[in-house]
Image (cartoon, rainbow, N blue to C red):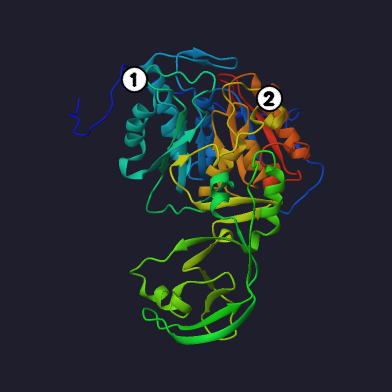
């Protein structure tokens, strides 16, 4: 036996690799489903829903899909030692590692060179699987770990022998980091009360402006024009009785979205902005004056300054979507309830899947980060079918594999509703989904069957 020279995780049975019997996939036309007509030019019809053991199914997919999958998301059993309604979540640790490793090796082969794998786990196995993934993909291919806030401290069933366990984790790996490029790393979430308390001013009118100076910016040489405004009107949005008036306040923010700002102090070392402020009496602005600057005469105002501070616009860190203001910004690796709303999660997709269903908003964010329309998304632990439902609504192609009978009772009906456009839950409204496309339903051929 050759001497091993690399750091690795070992377990009982790791070197034992029984040969997989090749299987083929057989379509069940009675369970395949498609819209009667094309709803959009981007409709996807050849999606695959496979009922059967995912190791055998992944092996069968190798024939046609090696190097073709852009994104893999899997939410395997966490191996917590508990038994749930739709699956047994407690197997011997070594066996769990072996089951996962064999599947991850095939998933790695199915990924495109610029593809990404997400593995969703909790604290029971995430650190062990991180070492396994370093072996399968290479440590250099590790993109990051996302901490996802599943629930608050007071929620039911958090557990934790020491501190309350409220988070789950998503490990992200690239197939080839040199070929990988992120697609959309802008996050979004509801505008929180604490943000509203800062962004609560509205520039109703800038008043009459008069040019007071012009010069070239010292660092860039760009022409700058300074204006002084008389008769400017600035109002404040009242956040009094926020919880009772929440809908009313949110509507007011949407109405004035383009004109809402907060003030931030000018740093003493910022000589450029301090020079701008010097064009107002004593550098302090009364209620009747504000200063602005543009790049050149006639161009729209790019910055406003009031009472010795600079205006920062809400529209630069948020956007108006479906009549409500949602905040945006570069994503961090810590996702809270505000980042990933879970309202009405129990009813998403019209299926009941306790202790296993993930929010459509979570899957949408993950898919959007690394794929474009038309890319292929794969989930070999389909569960309640969330990944396929979201991918379909986002005009991505998808493959899902599920062993349990809920493939028939939960996943297939959920996907039929998505195709019909009757599923109004989850991200339907956010992505403007109206139905269309379809999927093919497959089963694994019996052992030894030949064509």
Where residue 256 sits, quadrant-wise, is bottom right
For mark 2, give the secondary structure.
helix
Numbered-mark total: 2
Q: Is residue 284 visible?
A: yes
Mark 2 burial class by Cα count in 10 Å: few <14, some 14-19, many 20+? some
Name above or below for residue 320 compared with residue 140.
Answer: below
Q: Work out which quarter of the rendered image holds the N terminus and state it.
A: top left
Q: Is residue 108 left or right of residue 40?
A: left
Q: Is residue 322 visible?
A: no
**Residue highlighted by disc 2:** 410
Q: Is residue 360 left or right of residue 279?
A: right
Q: Residue at x 45, y 54 (%)?
A: 181
Name above or below for residue 397 compared with residue 224.
Answer: above
On the image, the x and y values in percent for residue 103 come to: 45, 29
Q: Nearer the viewer's eye, disc 2 or disc 1?
A: 2
**Residue 16 marker:** 1
Q: Earlier in the sequence, mark 2 or mark 1?
A: 1
Between 241 and 177, the residue placed more toward the observer is: 241
Between 251 and 134, the residue placed more toward the observer is: 251
On the image, the x and y values in percent for residue 65 come to: 53, 41
Labelled pair 2, 1 in contact (Cβ < 8 Å):
no
For mark 1, give the secondary structure.
loop
Between 266 and 356, the residue placed more toward the observer is: 266
Q: Residue at x 35, y 29 (%)?
A: 127
Q: Residue at x 53, y 26 (%)?
A: 54
Mark 1 burial class by Cα count in 10 Å: few <14, some 14-19, many 20+? few
Q: CA distance from mark 2 to mark 1?
A: 35 Å
Q: Residue at x 34, y 20 (%)?
A: 16
């Amino acid at each position: 036996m050759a001497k091993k020279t690399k750091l690795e995780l070992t377990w009982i049975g790791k070197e034992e690799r029984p040969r997989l019997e090749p299987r083929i996939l057989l379509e069940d036309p009675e369970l395949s489903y498609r819209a009667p007509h094309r709803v959009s030019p981007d409709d996807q019809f050849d999606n695959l829903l496979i009922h059967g053991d995912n190791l055998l199914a992944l092996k069968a997919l190798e024939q046609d899909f090696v190097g073709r999958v852009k994104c893999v998301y899997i939410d395997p059993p966490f191996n917590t030692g508990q038994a749930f309604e739709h699956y047994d979540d407690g197997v011997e640790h070594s066996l769990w590692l072996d089951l996962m490793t064999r599947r991850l090796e095939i998933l790695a082969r199915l990924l495109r060179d610029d593809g990404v794998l997400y593995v969703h786990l909790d604290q029971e196995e995430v650190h062990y699987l991180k070492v396994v993934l370093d072996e399968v993909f290479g440590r250099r291919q590790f993109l990051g770990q996302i901490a996802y806030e599943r629930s608050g401290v007071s929620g039911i069933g958090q557990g934790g022998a020491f501190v309350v366990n409220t988070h789950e984790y998503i490990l992200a790996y690239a197939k080839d980091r040199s070929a990988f490029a992120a697609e959309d790393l802008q996050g979004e979430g509801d505008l929180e009360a604490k943000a509203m308390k800062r962004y609560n001013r509205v520039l109703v009118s800038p008043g009459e402006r008069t040019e007071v100076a012009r010069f070239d910016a010292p660092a860039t040489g760009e022409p700058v024009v300074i204006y002084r405004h008389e008769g400017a009107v600035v109002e404040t949005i009242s956040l009094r009785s926020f919880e009772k008036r929440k809908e009313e306040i949110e509507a007011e923010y949407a109405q004035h979205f383009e004109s809402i700002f907060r003030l931030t102090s000018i740093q003493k070392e910022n000589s450029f902005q301090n020079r701008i402020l010097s064009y107002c009496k004593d550098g302090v602005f009364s209620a009747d004056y504000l200063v602005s600057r543009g790049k050149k005469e006639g161009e729209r105002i790019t910055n406003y300054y009031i009472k010795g501070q600079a205006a920062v616009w809400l529209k630069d860190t948020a956007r108006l979507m479906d009549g409500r203001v949602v905040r945006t910004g570069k994503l961090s690796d810590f996702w809270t309830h505000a980042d990933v709303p879970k309202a009405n999660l129990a009813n998403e997709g019209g299926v009941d899947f306790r202790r296993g269903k993930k929010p459509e908003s979570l899957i949408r964010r993950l898919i959007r980060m690394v794929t474009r329309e038309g890319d292929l998304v794969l989930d070999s632990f389909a569960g309640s079918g969330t990944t396929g439902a979201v991918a379909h609504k986002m005009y991505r192609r998808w493959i899902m594999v599920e062993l349990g009978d809920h493939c028939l009772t939960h996943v297939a009906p959920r996907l039929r509703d998505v195709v019909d456009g009757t599923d109004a839950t989850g991200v339907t409204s956010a992505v403007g989904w109206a139905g269309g496309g379809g999927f093919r339903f497959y089963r694994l051929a019996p052992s030894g069957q030949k064509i």
